[in-house]
Amino acid sequence: MKSTAITLTPGCPVRTTMEMLGGKWRLLILHQLAAGPLRFGALRRLVPDISEKVLVHELRHLADSGLVLRTNHGEVPPRVEYHLTDLGRLALPVLAAVGEFGQAYVAQARLPRGSEESSQALDQQASLR
Amino acid sequence: MKSTAITLTPGCPVRTTMEMLGGKWRLLILHQLAAGPLRFGALRRLVPDISEKVLVHELRHLADSGLVLRTNHGEVPPRVEYHLTDLGRLALPVLAAVGEFGQAYVAQARLPRGSEESSQALDQQASLR
DNA sequence: CGAGGTACCTACCTTTAGGTAAGTATGAAA
DNA sequence: TTTCATACTTACCTAAAGGTAGGTACCTCG
């Protein structure tokens, strides 16, 4: 099993985080794992539109950076589980803030100017799709 | 002045946010603008290592997506100011969470296993450099 | 016997992000 | 008169991200 080299920009926490969590898929994967451990196949089904190759790649990156633990149960047919580490749980506030910004942004940005009383739905529960 | 087409993935706030704030530089730019309006040249000096072309590009993206307002004072020599909009201020919690994760990650991930009493410095103020 | 599910790997390709280096028009300072 | 600073633009290039399509080894179910 090949590893990814994790490179960090020292001294800048923002750049560090972008190197860990940046990209199209990583936060979505962490979001699914936040609810509990998942097998590869389950993740593939839960994260919409991701390709197998990229899912493998991202899971490896997350494992190499210590956010996710990979457990191979050594069975046949294969059974591999992924779950968040304590370090991975540190990323959940980022996920929360990102989700909230996304909701607030679509709520605010799509007001066609002057629709006064239409920003009540800001705190409602919205699914991540 | 050319505009960037802002494309959003509807229905997923996380993907929406990544499309708005993702990439190497955007959060760093917002961080600088959080303290107050800045001219182009000041931003170039404050955001280390960014190239002019990319700074122009990112500022245009941020302006097109409504997070930043560009003000051309029409003077000669040119004087152009950038400042956060209300929408842009909505991104500050993301920036905060990202910064905190980065600090916590470097603090946690670099413990060489068993150095018990060395995680005291977690809440100290760290600069974004 | 053949199809389907497991968790991958590999080669190849396209798209995007980002970087380098140069040029532009203007005015002020040396 | 040359240089500097302003806020850009343009052309070109590289590297990384991501996507497509196929293969692998093993087992079970029909």
Image: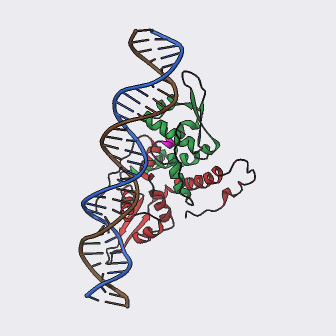
Chain colours: A red, B green, C blue, D brown
Give the x, y percent position of residue D24. Answer: 24, 72
B74 vs A3, left or right, is: right
Whether residue B24 appears in magenta in the rendering, the answer is: yes
Which residue does the image show at 46% across and 62% down from the upper left? A29
Image position of A4 with respect to A34: above or below: above
Q: Nearer the viewer, residue A125 or B39?
A: B39
Quarter of the figure with the C terminus of chain A: bottom right
Task: Write the residue at 40% across / 69% down.
Answer: A40
- Would residue C19 appear left or right of B8 to someone viewing this image? left
* A83 shown above or below B115: below
Q: Nearer the viewer, residue A129 or B109?
A: A129
Residue situated in front as seen by the camera: A97 or B5: B5
Residue at the location (44% across, 35% down)?
Answer: B53
Q: Which residues are magenta?
A: B22-27
Q: Position of residue A121 (x, y in %)?
A: 69, 58
The reply, left or right, for residue A77 in relation to residue A15 is left
